[in-house]
Image (cartoon, rainbow, N blue to C red):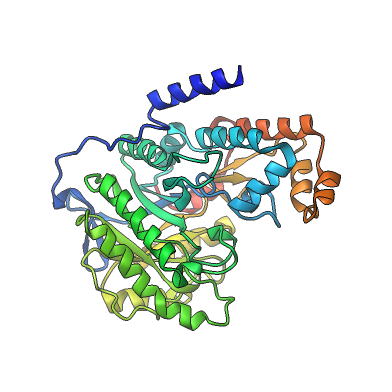
């Protein structure tokens, strides 16, 4: 019965364009003028109007992060999956991830995002979604293109732009939990990882080269955490690895903008020595906390002005409504568009908050328990029926209709 149900579900999802249907979308009649373009520090829409980016990030959907589930030690996609498999078994977890991807972000979520005044969505994704590596319930024939295809269609319906962000690159570009890595940015020392990163971006660009809904491609997120003794050496490799990715994309796509983030949490732009090496480049910075003043982002503004290219705040948030309102005014005054982080997670400080289901604290407790030996796993494992019901209930809780809209948070972003 389980296998029959899985087969029926797969057929239904394929018919809906969600999995397994990997043929390219039909080619569209487009010209270079069909896309968002760059004029100095400004983005220009096809109708000739300036685009000032405002919106949100679909974090956690295709790159799970622990804190959005209230996990602390279990803080990356790999760690979360391992923990869940230890708790309830790999088959149940595979079904959980499939349901999670189906329900965490839907057409209704995109409609809601549009209603807030947003004009742009940033999609963080894991490179494994475009490989045959084991990830989020699939061990082959990953569904990355099907997920992006659906999101593109939903954004087109609502008149939203979409930025594709490789949040987790092969080998790891950051060396911390946010890139699901092995604790070091191996991307910058591995030719094999760099080749895979280029190959994936070339495939993505080839598929979406005629899609104006996509504003641009962000090659990878927050490269090179500041923890490493050889940070300066790693920083010196950043621009060259970016150039490899740009070259791969330009083999098939001459139209889309490519976004490059600074080193150390997208905050350090000193490593760029040839900042205008492509004619469709824009830069992206991130910032959390600190004073909500122009002086706090003067280095972003100075770099933007020195290269005469757009600067965009790809991630910002997790603060009070008052701070966010003040900082949005600063960004508007200084022509730096923004997408706040994240759209949805447990609790508040987001567009919509997920309410914890019954017994979720037991799942959190297991995630925090010592699990370095099989004995520790056995001793910490909670009751199976309770744990599985909590995970099933989470899927229901994450649906937009059951989330709590954070009106004050949304209002502070000044998108209307």
Where residue 93 sits, quadrant-wise, is: top right
Q: Is residue 22 left or right of residue 78?
A: left
Q: Residue at x 71, y 57 (%)?
A: 73
Nearest the eye: 42 or 128: 128
The number of numbered discs placed on residues in the rendered structure image is 0
Q: Residue at x 48, y 83 (%)?
A: 232
Q: Position of residue 391 (x, y in %)?
A: 68, 35
Q: Residue at x 24, y 73 (%)?
A: 277
Where residue 175 sits, quadrant-wise, is: bottom right
Q: Position of residue 266 (x, y in %)?
A: 46, 69
Asked if one can make out residue 399 in the rendered structure from this viewpoint, the answer is no
Q: Is residue 191 left or right of residue 161?
A: right
Q: Position of residue 154 (x, y in %)?
A: 36, 35
Q: Residue at x 15, y 52 (%)?
A: 32
Q: Position of residue 309 (x, y in %)?
A: 27, 69
Which residue occupies the extreme front position in the image?
Answer: 192
Where residue 390 sits, quadrant-wise, is: top right
Q: Which image quadrant: the N terminus?
A: top right
Asked if one can make out residue 245 in the rendered structure from this viewpoint, the answer is yes
Nearest the eye: 84 or 60: 84
Nearest the eye: 283 or 111: 283
């Amino acid at each position: 019965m389980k296998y029959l149900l899985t087969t029926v579900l797969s057929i239904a999802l394929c018919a809906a364009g969600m999995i397994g249907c990997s043929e390219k979308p039909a080619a569209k009649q487009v010209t270079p003028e069909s896309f968002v373009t760059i004029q100095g520090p400004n983005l220009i829409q096809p109708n000739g109007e300036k685009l000032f980016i405002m919106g949100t990030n679909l974090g956690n959907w295709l790159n799970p992060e622990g804190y959005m589930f209230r996990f602390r030690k279990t803080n990356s996609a790999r760690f979360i999956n391992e923990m869940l498999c230890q708790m309830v078994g790999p088959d149940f977890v595979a079904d959980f991830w499939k349901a999670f991807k189906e329900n965490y972000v839907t057409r209704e979520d995109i409609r809601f995002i549009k209603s807030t005044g947003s004009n742009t969505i940033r999609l963080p994704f894991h490179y494994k979604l475009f490989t045959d590596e084991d990830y989020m319930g699939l061990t082959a024939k990953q569904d990355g293109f099907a997920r992006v295809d659906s999101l593109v269609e939903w954004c087109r319906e609502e008149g939203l732009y979409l930025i594709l962000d490789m949040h987790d690159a092969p080998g790891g570009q950051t060396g911390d939990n946010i890139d699901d890595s092995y604790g070091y940015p191996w991307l910058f020392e591995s030719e094999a990882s760099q080749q895979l990163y280029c190959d994936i971006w070339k495939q993505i660009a080839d598929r979406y080269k005629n899609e104006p809904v996509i504003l641009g491609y962000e090659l990878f997120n927050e490269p090179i955490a500041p923890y490493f003794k050889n940070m300066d050496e790693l920083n010196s490799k950043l621009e060259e690895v970016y150039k490899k990715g740009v070259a791969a994309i330009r083999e098939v796509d001459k139209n889309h903008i490519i976004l490059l983030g600074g080193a150390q949490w997208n905050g350090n732009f000193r490593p760029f020595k040839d900042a205008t090496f492509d004619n469709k480049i824009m830069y992206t910075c991130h910032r959390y906390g600190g004073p909500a003043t122009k002086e706090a982002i003067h280095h972003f503004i100075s770099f933007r002005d020195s290269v005469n290219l757009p600067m965009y705040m790809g991630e910002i948030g997790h603060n009070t409504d008052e701070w966010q309102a003040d900082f949005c005014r600063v960004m508007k005054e200084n022509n730096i568009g923004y997408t706040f982080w994240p759209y949805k997670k447990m609790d508040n400080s987001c567009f919509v908050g997920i309410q914890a289901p019954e017994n979720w604290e037991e799942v959190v407790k297991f995630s925090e328990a010592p699990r370095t030996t099989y004995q520790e796993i056995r001793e910490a494992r909670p009751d199976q029926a309770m744990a599985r019901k909590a995970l099933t209930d989470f899927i229901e809780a994450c649906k937009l209709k059951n989330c709590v809209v954070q009106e004050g948070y949304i209002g502070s972003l000044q998108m209307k």
